[in-house]
Amino acid sequence: MGINGKDDGDHAHLERVAILDFGAQYGKVIDRRVREANVLSEMFPLKTKAKHILDRGNFKAIIISGGPNSVYAEGAAQPDPAIFTCGLPVLGICYGFQLLNKALGGDVSKSELVREDGQCRIWLDTSNELFHGLNENEEVLLTHGDSVTEKTVAPNVQIIAKSGGHVAGISCPEKRLYGVQFHPEVDLTTNGRKMFDNFLFRISGCCSSYTMSNREQMCIDEIQKVVGDKKVLVLVSGGVDSSVCAALLSRALGPNRITAIHIDNGFMRKDESDRVIESLKAIDLPVHREYAGIKFMVATVSGKPGDGEPLDRTVEPELKRQIIGNTFIRVKDRVMEELKLNKDDYFLAQGTLRPDLIESASELASGHADTIKTHHNDTALVRELRASGRVIEPLKDFHKDEVRELGRSLGLPDQIVNRQPFPGPGLAIRIICAQKPHICSDFGTTHQCLNVLTNLRRQPSTPVEVEYREKMLAAMNTWEANELMAQNFAMNATLLPIKSVGVQGDSRSYSYVAALSCALPEIPWQLLSRYATIIPKLLHNINRVVYVFGGPVNYPVTTITPTYLNAFTVRTLQEADYLATEALYGRRIDGTRDPNLEDLSKKVQQVHS
């Protein structure tokens, strides 16, 4: 696919895989995994007819993604039935697995208690081609509420994977139809890449004929075609995405046709803007620096004073993102006026990646993805500019690891290419703002269930706790229950009255945060990791689990400190972030190497916001 989502004409002769996107949060990661295997993939809307795919020619297989909706939802997305009878191998993932099971005569069960949201260990039938070369027990990522059981599985199919009482995989080898409830495309499925290789090469007969070597030139050709004789204004944060974007534009058009602007929104990391300007000198790119911290603080979504809460009084993270994204555009417009740049002569370039658009449910990525969080590069104002044809996003078909590879090819220094990812809205999103405690009618019950779950070995003191304990044990895999029952110390669990943005199923959720603590001298990280998976799986109104340092928390937390964005909260987080970052890189506070600390920077893929 080209940077505008169109077919690559030069590759019409290459074999490829069709991906039917049903709106999965991981939809484009499936695409990434296929291309990572050097197989060309093409995304199609969910209603695409099988005949259309067959008529295009050169398609070797079809993959059906997951999706945020239930198969029971009114108007639930359905594929063309001929997809399953067209003769091409099919792999259904998550929602796609459930659709395959229904198409083959089975049904789907809706569980009232159990979601599976996290990394779980499941059983695989390793005699099946899809799982060739794997172990019988593998770690996979499950994110679903609806399930297939042995009672609802389609007749005459092979059950090739199980998770507790749930069917986690089926196959019909003679028709080359395969389905898995889990997500093989993500890193939390430990051997997911091997599963894709098995499907692409052993089952579908693909060849590794699509390489990364020509993608840089494809992007350059496309930039030159779209921009023509005009110029480009690029917003640079100093991160890897915007820096690679700027370098690619400079390679395609020459530095004289590029105007780079760095907007300091006041929420950057400590000394961030200074480092940004210094690092971009490495690619000989002059950058106009604009401080706009006060303008961002008082900005509203519409940009009109008094029309809605300003950013420094806004508590909802989604609204914060929209305000910040729109304000970037408004500040950009003002800077262009000050620099006497004619808007009609310029395209706006952004370093937007595919995952950014997926999280925002952008039509560019998929009109069916559930909005996880609005990306600052994909707000209403940006979409208006896009619709007018004035935005160019050369990297919107790339994933982060591909961008790093492209950056190296363009000659960017390691300090840019390997830079730790940082969200565009910056620290404004990492500061959880609230006016009052988030305590709904389910707070007390959830807190009670949480305490039972984190101390299963302790005998319940009331009939209600006995019931909770029995239900939760019944919902766990045997190995999960055994691991938690072996816990020989008290785990203190406290439900925090704040709202956290998370992902459950393929949808965004606003839910409670569970805070764990204990009196052990050494922190039991492995057990805590297991709790981080099991708690959201069983208690659906919790979507985040944190650990509290400094000893056990022995009291309920029902109050909060009213918190907003202001100079004090931002400065405090800047210092805390600086200390944490130095420790992550194995450095002392003064920036020198600490021999007692390991450099873990390359082991952290993303710092979440």
Image (cartoon, rainbow, N blue to C red):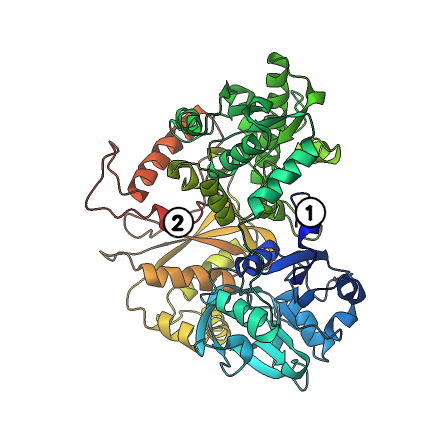
Q: Is residue 547 visible?
A: no
> Observer-nearest residue: 400 or 402?
402
The answer to whether the residue labelled 1 contacts the one labelled 2, judged by CB atoms less than 8 Å apart, is no
- 10 Å neighbourhood of mark 1: few (<14), some, or many (≥20)? few
Q: Which residue is mark 1?
A: 5
The amino acid on which the numbered mark 2 sits, given as a three-letter code, is Val
Specify the amino acid type for callout 1: Gly
Residue occupying image coordinates x 68% and y 73%: 100
User: Measured from the top left, where is residue 1 in percent x and y?
Assistant: 66, 50
Task: Locate residue 20, reporting x and y percent.
Answer: 69, 61
Look at the image and tell me whether residue 414 can be seen: yes
- Per the image, the residue denoted by label 2 is 604
Left or right, 300 with reference to 569: right
Using the rendered view, name the quadrant where residue 376 is placed: top right
Count every numbered label the image shows and give the total. 2
Camera-side residue of 49 and 250: 250
Kindly report the distance in space between the C-alpha atoms of the residues bearing marks 1 and 2.
30 Å
